[in-house]
Amino acid sequence: MKRLRILVVDDETYIRTAIERTLESLQFIMADIGETVAFDFEEAGSAEEARDHIADTSPPDIMLLDLKLPGISGIELLEEIGPSLSTTLVIMITAYASIETAVRATKSGAYDFLAKPFTPEELEHVLQKAAHHIVIAHRARALAEEQRQVRFQFLSVLAHELKAPLNAIEGFLNTIIDHTAGNDPAVYEEMLRRCRTRAQFMRKLIIDLLDLTRIESGKKKRELTEVNMAAIARISKDTMQPDADARNITIDIQCDPELSIHGDPGEIEMVFNNLISNAVKYNRENGRVDVRCDRLADTITIIVADTGIGMTEEEAAQLFESFVRIKNEKTFGILGSGLGLAVVKKVAMLYSGDVSVASVPDEGSTFTVFLRDNEVDSAAGKP
């Protein structure tokens, strides 16, 4: 339950007392945003007392402010301390409302008006509207702060991930330009190959980042059609085949040539590319990668198993978060962005699915992706 502070500023004691009694048991259940709101009552009998109260505590969430007060008026108080009430909704209480008064109060920051005399129902109505506005504003600020933190983390990790390969490339290129490694051309060719490897890593990192941000932002245009699973699996195999051949790793695909899903070809290829790439990258020499696709009712299953280094349960539990890479003596020297499996999970969620892993250290890992075929649901008349 969220509790909002209400400061009632009115020189009439019975008004303050009536409002306090109304607030004692008042709660609003806001079903549309999943929040229940109650109120804490605070009071002041004059503008001067209210000003001191706010200075001694902090601005309230809502201030019910009487227009006519002894000494400083309600509007004069609002004009005086308005800048310090940026997060406070001010509701003017008045029996002498006029167009000029309303314009002046609104310009000074008033959110709403409550005409005297008012009923408990009228008070509840104006407070419900104000409370709903405040809760939405609080959530928007929290979301903005969360997004700011995510952007900061994103840029920090990106800078960290790019710094090492850029430094390596710069070092190799300086050596090549200055000819400080002797006169053997093979030495310089090896340096160029290493530069190319690190450039390929950086390109993969950028592609993974773009894929992930487009999916999460919802701005990636989806082109939904009938996607042949076997055809996409073969494309991914062909892409990874040179790396597999270099280490004598066999990639075997078992997939019904007629198996298809209603989806985006690019999204399905992301899944296969990332899973097969990892299965090759973290495999052993002369190993195997087995790719299998099946259908059970409205669900397509993609299974990619390897004979690689495997991982512990603790390591596997971290895999599907962004920028997470398993770092130990077995993975030393293996380049990766830590984003591929996060992309796989995001894609699976687009299809009301999920991804899981089963792994045994030094024996291998098996990744299983579940994708729901919504076209099958539609054809069957399911919701």
Image (cartoon, grey):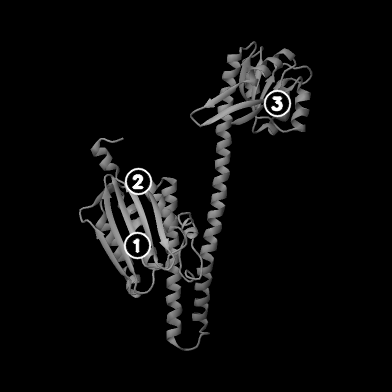
Q: Amino acid at mark 1?
A: Ala
Q: Determine which of the numbered discs, if any, sits on residue 72 in the image.
A: none
Q: Secondary structure at mark 2?
A: loop
Q: Amino acid at mark 3?
A: Leu
Q: Which residue: 57% across, 23% down? A: 128
Residue 271, above or below 134: below
Badge 1: residue crowd in 10 Å (few <14, some 14–19, many ≥20): many
- Disc tally is 3
Residue carrying label 3: 78
Q: Residue 19 at what x, y percent from top left?
A: 67, 17
Real-space CA distance between mark 3 and mark 2, rounded to the nearest whole angstrom: 53 Å
Residue carrying label 1: 305
| Residue 12 visible, this angle | no
| Residue 325 visible, this angle | yes
Residue 341, above or below 129: below
Q: Amino acid at mark 2?
A: Tyr
Of circles 1 and 2, which is in front? 1
Q: Give left or right: position of 78 versus 99.
A: right
| Quarter assignment of residue 153 | bottom right
Q: Give left or right: position of 175 versus 349.
A: right
Name, please, the residue furthest toward the left.
Answer: 258
Q: Residue 46 at what x, y percent from top left?
A: 77, 20
Q: Residue 82 at what x, y percent from top left?
A: 69, 30
Asked whether 340 or 207 is in front, the reply is: 340
| Quarter assignment of residue 75 | top right
Asked whether 120 or 357 is in front, the reply is: 357
Residue 171, above or below 271: below
Of circles 1 and 3, which is in front? 1
For the residues labelled 1 and 3, say whether their Cβ atoms are less than 8 Å apart: no
Q: Residue 167 at what x, y percent from top left?
A: 53, 71
Q: Secondary structure at mark 1?
A: strand
Residue carrying label 2: 351
